[in-house]
Image: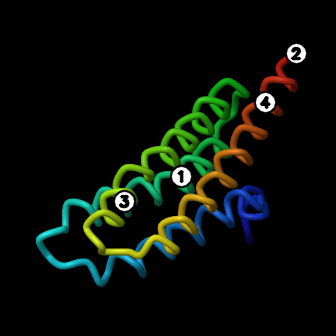
């Protein structure tokens, strides 16, 4: 049995992003644990909030969790920037991560707007 949200492209992209983040931060030195932990938590929070929002009964609750998921996508930007500045990731990887986040954020904005339209 699968849950409906698992078929959402944005959810799949969010899980793939979190997986890629985990794989990337595994090579960070221990002294940067705080950075890898923050990035991993924020990236996983995107998918978690999409899933949780889809489990809610009211449209307002769903919208609220999609907004939180979008905020988590934005929350990934500062630790990625610091990882790039500290040369833990290269500029190309940084740009790829940011492009993926931009796509996810736009898709979440679409979910939020779709939820608003269904409320009317």
In space, the residues marked 1 and 2 are separated at their CA atoms by 26 Å
Q: Residue at x 50, y 67 (%)?
A: 18
Which image quarter holds the C terminus? top right
Q: Which residue sits furthest left? A: 31
Task: Please say if 80 is above or below 106.
Answer: below
Figure quadrant of residue 100: bottom right
Q: Residues within 10 Å of mark 3 (few under 14, many from 20)?
A: many
* Secondary structure category for the residue under label 4: helix
Q: Residue at x 54, y 65 (%)?
A: 95
Task: Please say if 63 is above or below 97.
Answer: above
Q: Label 1: which residue?
A: 46
Q: Nearer the viewer, mark 2 or mark 3?
A: 3
Q: Position of residue 11 (x, y in %)?
A: 67, 59
Q: Label 3: which residue?
A: 39
State how the image is colored: rainbow
Q: Which mark is residue 120?
A: 2
Q: Position of residue 6 (x, y in %)?
A: 72, 63
Q: Which mark is residue 113?
A: 4
Q: Position of residue 23 (x, y in %)?
A: 42, 81
Disc nearer the start of the sequence (3/1): 3
Q: Position of residue 49 (x, y in %)?
A: 55, 47
Is 115 placed left or right of 19 in the picture? right
In space, the residues marked 3 and 4 are separated at their CA atoms by 27 Å
Disc nearer the start of the sequence (4/1): 1
* Secondary structure category for the residue under label 1: helix
In space, the residues marked 4 and 1 are separated at their CA atoms by 17 Å
Q: Residue at x 50, y 74 (%)?
A: 93
Discs 1, 2 touching: Cβ within 8 Å: no
């Amino acid at each position: 049995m699968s849950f409906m949200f698992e078929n959402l492209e944005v959810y799949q992209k969010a899980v793939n992003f979190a997986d890629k983040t985990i794989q990337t931060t595994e090579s960070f030195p221990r002294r940067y644990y705080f950075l890898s932990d923050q990035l991993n938590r924020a990236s996983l929070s995107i998918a978690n909030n999409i899933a949780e929002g889809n489990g809610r009964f009211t449209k307002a609750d769903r919208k609220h969790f999609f907004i939180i998921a979008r905020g988590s996508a934005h929350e990934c930007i500062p630790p990625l920037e610091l990882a790039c500045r500290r040369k833990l990731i290269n500029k190309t990887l940084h740009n790829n991560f940011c492009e993926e986040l931009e796509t996810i954020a736009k898709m979440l904005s679409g979910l939020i707007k779709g939820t608003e339209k269904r409320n009317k």
